Image (tube, helix red, strand yellow):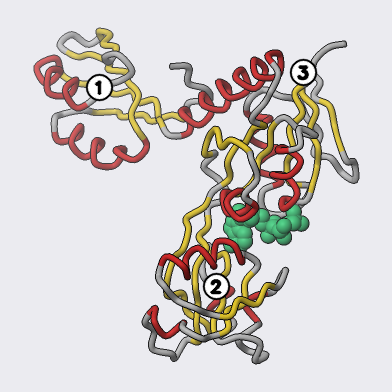
Amino acid sequence: MVTKLRIAIQKSGRLHEDSIRLLQECGIDISNGGNKLKSSAANFPLEVFFLRDDDIPQYVEDAVADAGIVGENVVYEKKKQVEVMEQLGFGKCRLSIAVGRNEEFDRKQLEGKRIATSYPVLLQEYLDNNKITADIHEISGSVEIAPGIGLAEAICDLVSSGSTLLTNGLKEVETILHSQAVLIQNKNLGEANRTLLQSLLFRIRSVKKAKNNKYILLNAPNDSLDKIISLLPGMKSPTVLPLATSGWSSVHSVIDENDFWRIIEQLKGAGAQGILVVPIEKMIV
Ligand code: ATP
Ligand code: MG
């Protein structure tokens, strides 16, 4: 029997599309599930299970799936025996405490209060670390309405833009955890599946790396080449090719997305012209 790697992803919801897209960017041909429970890749020994995100750590711990894609918030709340292998750069959010918009806030004011949350384990850890005793009300969804209906004085919930809090008259006052989607694996994978997962991880890292970098091409007068090359470290060092116009060269390199605008300004200042910046599809390092 041919070994297939079984990976669990969210069936529908905020992580579903980005998880499918990541697999597709890794060159894995997968349909997006529809109403199916599982789906096989056409060109990689991979089977994808579509599940509720809350259940993914348990399935991976139990080896029903070899690996999974799920938010760190769920991994740390569920406390299952799984290994976090890689942060994936999407599904970014934070788990925060929020109170009524007009309330003054100081941590100690949570003492004796009722706090509504879907994350009782993480909230309890935060309260313990801060030596606060409060009454945790676990609810499974729409946590933000709890203060408005008199169920709690504060909430502990996931926030990204903060607009849900705002429309419910709440303000974010403390962040307990920063979270993003991660790849998790079962701790006792067999040899064959471990190898397959390593090859998937290699592809994921190449895709992530490419997203964080840009390919840059520019023209420069030869007498400013030294300065320009010092600004562009590249993967090894920049490629320099002569232009048809004498005294000029074309310089090619790779730059980190985060340094992009700062470096562009400096390059222009050093005499670079005709600067082109293009996305990179995969980056093997
Ligand atoms: P399921 O039906 O699979 O249980 P769900 O309703 O629990 O879905 P979603 O709301 O789809 O979950 O969120 C999935 C994950 O997306 C969260 O666990 C979190 O990691 C991430 N996420 C990113 N931004 C947000 C946000 N603003 N609110 C909630 N989750 C967010
Ligand atoms: Mg869920």
What SS does tag 1 mark? loop
Quadrant where the N terminus is found in the figure:
top right
Residue 244 visible in rendering: no
The picture quadrant where one finds residue 216 is: top left
Discs 3/2, front: 3
Question: How many residues crowd mark 2 within 10 Å: few (<14), some (14–19), many (20+)?
Answer: few
At horizontal 68% and vertical 14% (from top left) the residue drawn is: 191
Q: Which of 169 and 99 is in front in this view?
A: 99
Q: Find out whether the residues at labels 1 and 3 contact each other: C-beta distance under 8 Å.
A: no
Q: Residue 35: where, in percent of width, then height? A: 90, 45
Question: How many residues crowd mark 1 within 10 Å: few (<14), some (14–19), many (20+)?
Answer: few
Q: Residue 229: where, in percent of width, then height? A: 19, 20
Query: For this view, does 97 lie left or right of residue 29?
Result: left
The answer to whether 185 is drawn above or below residue 74 in the figure is above
At horizontal 65% and vertical 67% (from top left) the residue drawn is: 118
Query: For this view, does 34 lie left or right of residue 111?
Result: right
Q: Tally the numbered discs.
A: 3
What SS does tag 2 mark? helix
Taking the image as four quarters, which one is ligand 1 found in? bottom right
The answer to whether 264 is drawn above or below residue 160 in the figure is above
Residue where numbered disc 2 is placed? 163
Residue where numbered disc 1 is placed? 233
